[in-house]
Image: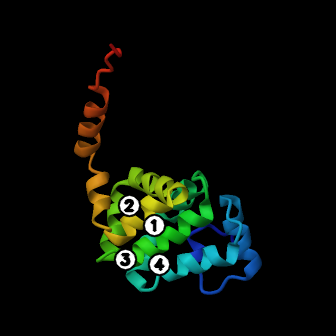
Amino acid sequence: MASLTPKDLLLAAQLSSDQVASLLSPYGFKDIQRADANLQAVADDPRVRHLLAEIIEEFLFCIARSADPDQALNFFERFAKAAINTSHLLAYLKANPRVLDLLAVVFGGSPFMSEVLIRDPEYLYWISDPRILEETGKRRTSFVILPMP
């Protein structure tokens, strides 16, 4: 059999638990079975499965760099399920790979912000809009600290 890639997690007919572990362990997951279950739960329909397979390598790379890969993937699964249209979400992430990194940072590092996004998934489009980020950055740098009298 040819060497496996992360896409095989979603597209291969059958993988052994050892094969799943060899594919997911390089990304820092402590609970491999749960990580695989999260991915399979997100990819619950054929269109979503193929869209996720198209971004899975970049997605796992971003999650691996997060503070807690297991937490990041758990929150991502919940976020994807809360999205109005998971196919649209994954197509958006494919077209905007920097948003994958943004989600990994938030989901891996901030349970509070993760819950906010899960409650209102549409906020993702607002916080990832470059115009919003640029405007916020301008405001943040325009503050002047005056000396105390």
- The residue that disc 3 covers is 82
**Left or right: 108 as drawn, with respect to 33:** left
Residue at (45, 67) in percent of width and height = 54
Query: Earlier along the polypeptide chain: callout 1 or callout 2?
Result: 1
Q: Is residue 102 left or right of residue 89?
A: right
Residue 54 is labelled as 1
29 left or right, relative to 40: right
Instruction: For the C terminus, give its image quadrant.
Output: top left
Residue 57: image quadrant is bottom right
Tag 4: amino acid: Val
Please state the horizontal and vertical placement of residue 113, each as a whole percent of the image: 42, 59
Looking at the rendered structure, the kind of residue marked 3 is Ala
Disc 3 to disc 1, how far (Cα)?
Answer: 21 Å
Q: Which mark is residue 68?
A: none
The kind of residue on which mark 2 rests is Lys
C-alpha span from label 4 to label 2 = 15 Å
Q: Nearer the viewer, residue 1 or 125?
A: 125
Front label number (4 vs 2): 4
